[in-house]
């Protein structure tokens, strides 16, 4: 025991300081690492559930079927069956929770054109129109029924 | 040598021993208290990430460049206004070669006005000069050796066990290293939360059995999503792998992306 | 005058040739001048400390008048050195996370970031 202390005092103090720093760091690390860290990997395991419990803005096509089953069935029989209701009508979660006319969009001319306006980059099998040659009004629904496109109103 | 076993020294040593024995539970209790102040969650654990393997695929032959996907993503995930995109659609126009030049193709023009959200303007070259033109939706490539996960200094971005690459918004320090590291440009620093953000495959939707918002609103099924662990043979994602020859973006970087594209050209970067 | 100034500003603003990913086409770079300041300040610290050590360790008598100042300079700048790095972070209050859960991967730079933090 005595032989250990034959090292010069300043060296002994430095050694003590180094050990003290390491101990303080380990203690701080023990207390300050978040609880679920390392559960699945080098991250907070709780983050997975936190990310999974955010609120939705879009409801999904199935949610519309509950109240609008007629339109849902009609849509499913014709060319637009690959579309979701919310593609044209906008986000539906708020409308699903509180069904009103003003928290869902009715859809309009601009939405039809988003997909059907002629563009050389679009694939050839997709039905496209050059709007100024096709129609000069403002409502596609004059001649087309969006839920069953080949039907004539 | 005098015997130093005085009452003071005995009591001192005894109390030191008791403190040593009690140290462990006291430390645990103190840790619980301090960590309640730090990050905690009360979310229920009814979803097991080990039991799923989410993946997305893109069929660029079917993309019509409507931009519904980019718009839906912006709304669903509250992406800040401005040039911040979790997913976007690019338009590639490959022009015809100059006559007599002996080249197979002309130059390639790429554009992405506002991420494709509001559709695309007139092409910059007249229709007669276009040899090929197509749209390519882009998003997080779900790399197996993601550079973004490797460089995070604190472990805030990670590969979830179910295939998505996620960011822990409560742990991210906003250094921007992962944004620099991603070779596909799919990350950005959100000016609202001051952390990095990226496509999470709409984690809050897929864990509830819904599809990501972009897949939901795509009118032509150009985006295909599925769970590889629980997929039946008629599932769209397995049909996609079965029926298409696929490529991945930037294979030379060794990131091993899990996002496969069908129908893109060599000019797509 | 204002018209010319506007023209100059328009030319100086980021002008990209070729295609840039939309997320990367930001007006301001992600890592700007704040990151550069850190090695500059640590360079000052190192230089000042070397000058001080020359006096006491290597017995260079000629530098004796600047000994105190250089030591003080080194210490003062050392205290300021991490500040630009802290300010460039989105969340400076979480900086301690780098020391508590440093991500030590084969990528040497991320370890360097952690070590730089300590």
Image (cartoon, rainbow, N blue to C red):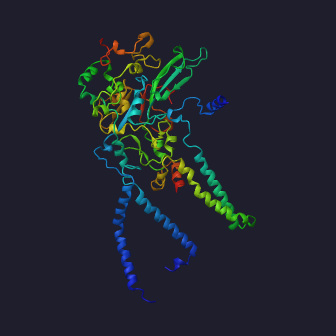
Q: Residue at x 37, y 26 (%)?
A: B218
Extreme residue toward the front, this view: C1
Count the labels in the image: 0
Query: Furthest-top residue in view?
Result: A133
Q: At which x and y percent is residue C99?
A: 48, 56
* Front position in the image: B210 or B120: B120
Taking depth in this image into account, of B59 and C5 the one nearest to the observer is: C5
Query: Is residue C74 visible to the viewer in this orientation of the structure?
Result: yes
Residue sitting at 57 percent across and 29 percent down?
C18
Residue A130 appearing in the image? no
Residue A42 location, x and y as percent?
A: 41, 50
Name the residue furthest bottom.
Answer: B2
Q: Position of residue A94 (x, y in %)?
A: 31, 33
When the figure is inspected, residue B167 is found, relative to residue A132, above or below; the finding is: below
Residue for point 29% across, 13% down: A151
Q: Within the image, what quadrant is residue B221 found in?
A: top left
Foreground residue among B79 and B112: B79
In the displayed structure image, the side of residue C82 where residue A127 appears, left or right: left
Would you place residue C78 above or below residue B188 in this image? below
Residue A26, given in percent of the width and then of the height, sits at 44, 62
Left or right side of A37 for C111: right
Q: Which residue is the extreme one toward the right?
A: C62
């Amino acid at each position: 025991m005595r032989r250990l202390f034959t090292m010069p005092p300043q060296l002994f103090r430095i050694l003590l300081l180094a050990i003290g720093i390491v101990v303080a760091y380990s203690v701080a690390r023990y207390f300050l690492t978040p609880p679920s860290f390392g559960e699945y990997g080098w991250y907070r395991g709780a983050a997975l559930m936190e990310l999974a419990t955010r609120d939705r803005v879009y409801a999904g096509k199935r949610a519309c079927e509950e109240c609008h089953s007629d339109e849902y069935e009609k849509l499913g029989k014709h060319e637009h069956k690959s579309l979701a209701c919310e593609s044209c009508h906008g986000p539906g979660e708020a409308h699903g929770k509180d069904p009103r006319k003003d928290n869902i969009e009715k859809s309009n001319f601009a939405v039809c054109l988003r997909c059907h306006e002629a563009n050389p980059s679009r694939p050839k099998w997709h039905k496209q129109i050059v709007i100024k040659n096709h129609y000069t009004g403002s409502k596609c629904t004059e001649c087309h029924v969006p839920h069953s496109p080949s039907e004539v109103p | 040598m005098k015997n130093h076993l005085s009452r003071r020294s005995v009591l001192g040593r005894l109390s030191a021993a008791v403190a040593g024995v009690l140290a462990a539970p006291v430390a645990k209790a103190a840790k619980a208290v301090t960590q309640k102040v730090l990050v905690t969650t009360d979310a229920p654990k009814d979803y097991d990430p080990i039991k799923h393997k989410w993946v997305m695929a893109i069929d660029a032959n079917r993309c019509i460049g409507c931009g519904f996907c980019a718009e839906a993503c912006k709304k669903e995930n509250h992406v800040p206004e401005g040039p911040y995109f979790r997913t976007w659609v690019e338009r590639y126009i490959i022009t015809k070669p100059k006559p007599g030049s002996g080249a197979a193709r002309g130059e390639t023009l790429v554009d992405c006005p506002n991420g494709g959200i509001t559709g695309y303007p007139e092409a910059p070259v007249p229709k007669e000069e276009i040899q090929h033109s197509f749209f390519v939706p882009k998003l997080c490539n779900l790399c197996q050796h993601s550079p973004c996960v490797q460089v995070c200094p604190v472990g805030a971005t990670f590969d979830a066990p179910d295939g998505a690459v996620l960011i822990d918004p409560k742990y991210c320090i906003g250094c921007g290293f992962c944004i620099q590291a991603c070779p596909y440009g799919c990350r950005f620093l959100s000016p609202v939360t001051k952390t990095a953000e990226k496509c999470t495959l709409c984690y809050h939707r897929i864990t509830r059995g819904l599809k990501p918002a972009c897949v939901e609103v795509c009118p032509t099924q150009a985006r295909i999503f599925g769970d590889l662990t629980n997929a039946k043979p008629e599932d769209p994602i397995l049909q996609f792998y079965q029926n298409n020859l696929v490529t991945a973006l930037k294979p030379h970087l060794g990131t091993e992306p899990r996002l496969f594209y069908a129908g893109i050209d060599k000019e797509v970067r | 005058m204002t018209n010319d100034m506007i023209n100059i500003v328009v030319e100086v603003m980021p002008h990209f040739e070729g295609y840039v990913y939309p997320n990367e086409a930001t007006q301001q770079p992600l890592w700007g001048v704040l990151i550069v300041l850190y090695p500059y300040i640590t360079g000052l610290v190192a230089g000042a400390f070397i000058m001080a050590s020359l006096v006491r360790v290597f017995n260079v008598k000629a530098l004796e008048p600047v000994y105190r100042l250089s030591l003080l300079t080194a210490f003062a700048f050392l205290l300021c050195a991490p500040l630009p790095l802290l300010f460039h972070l989105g969340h400076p209050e979480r900086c301690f996370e780098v020391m508590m859960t440093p991500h030590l991967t084969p990528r040497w730079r991320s370890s360097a970031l952690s070590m730089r933090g300590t």
